């Protein structure tokens, strides 16, 4: 379990170091990153029923709510979306919630081919009574 938390933490912090992938609103910080599934420890992947393969990748989303004191607290959210390749083949992202108490992650797996550019269209909805926050980005994936 600690390996899983450490892996996700490193991925989030690692992305922040060179190109932070975060959307900030007045109420929330939404951290996200996509990575090859083989980066996840095999035992942790099995425990959370995540697919590991050289042709499988994952999208990780963590939502933090800003409080009046400037703290950022893990926030539950409804996450839906798709990922598609350049020829328009689309996959629905089915997010799995990983709740580690103070840490809360949403992970979805998808397949890709080597050197394939993938486009993500995701709705993150921390407040079910408000409009979702749109998350759109593209990333190239490699099998090795």
Image: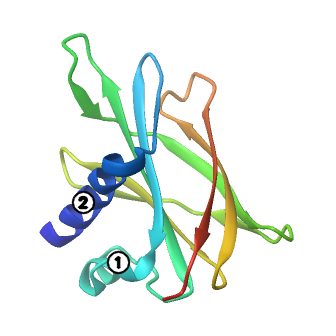
Question: Where is residue 136 shown, x and y percent of the image?
Answer: 65, 45
Residue 20 position by quadrant? top left
Question: Where is residue 75 shown, x and y percent of the image?
Answer: 35, 36
Q: Give yes or no for contact between labels 2 and 1 (Cβ–Cβ under 8 Å).
A: no
At numbered mark 1, what does the secondary structure look like: helix, strand or loop? Answer: helix
Among numbered discs 2 and 1, the one appearing first in the sequence:
2
Question: Where is residue 3 shown, x and y percent of the image?
Answer: 17, 71
Residue 44 drawn above or below residue 106 = below
* Nearer to the camera, 48 or 20: 20
Q: Which residue is the site of mark 2?
A: 10
Residue at the extreme left of the image, as rendered: 2
Residue 102 drawn above or below residue 91 = above
* Nearer to the camera, 118 or 56: 118
Residue at the extreme front of the image, as rendered: 18
Q: CA distance from mark 2 to mark 1?
A: 11 Å
Report the side of 58 relative to 88 (left or right).
Answer: left
Q: How many marks?
A: 2
Residue at 22% from the left image edge and 17% from the top image edge: 70
- Please name the colour scheme applied to the rendered image: rainbow
Report the side of 29 relative to 137 (left or right).
Answer: left
Q: Residues within 10 Å of mark 1 (few under 14, many from 20)?
A: some
Residue 107 drawn above or below residue 134 = below
Residue at 57% from the left image edge and 22% from the top image edge: 129
Residue 54 drawn above or below residue 64 = below
Report the side of 59 relative to 80 (left or right).
Answer: left
The numbered mark at residue 119 is none
Residue 29 position by quadrant? top left
At numbered mark 2, what does the secondary structure look like: helix, strand or loop? Answer: helix
* Nearer to the camera, 25 or 86: 86
Q: Which residue is the site of mark 1?
A: 39
Question: Where is residue 134 shown, x and y percent of the image?
Answer: 63, 36
């Amino acid at each position: 379990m600690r390996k899983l938390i450490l892996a996700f933490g490193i991925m989030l912090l690692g992305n922040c170091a060179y190109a932070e992938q975060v959307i900030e609103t007045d109420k929330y910080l939404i951290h996200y990153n996509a990575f090859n599934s083989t980066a996840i420890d095999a035992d942790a992947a099995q425990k959370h029923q995540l697919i590991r393969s050289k042709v499988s990748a994952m999208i990780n989303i963590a939502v933090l709510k800003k409080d009046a004191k400037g703290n950022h607290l893990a926030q539950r959210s409804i996450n839906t979306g798709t990922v598609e390749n350049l020829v328009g083949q689309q996959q629905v992202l089915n997010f799995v919630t990983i709740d580690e108490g103070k840490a809360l992650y949403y992970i979805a797996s998808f397949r890709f081919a080597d050197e394939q550019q993938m486009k993500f269209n995701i709705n993150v909805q921390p407040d079910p009574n408000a409009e979702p926050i749109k998350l759109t980005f593209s990333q190239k994936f490699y099998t090795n």
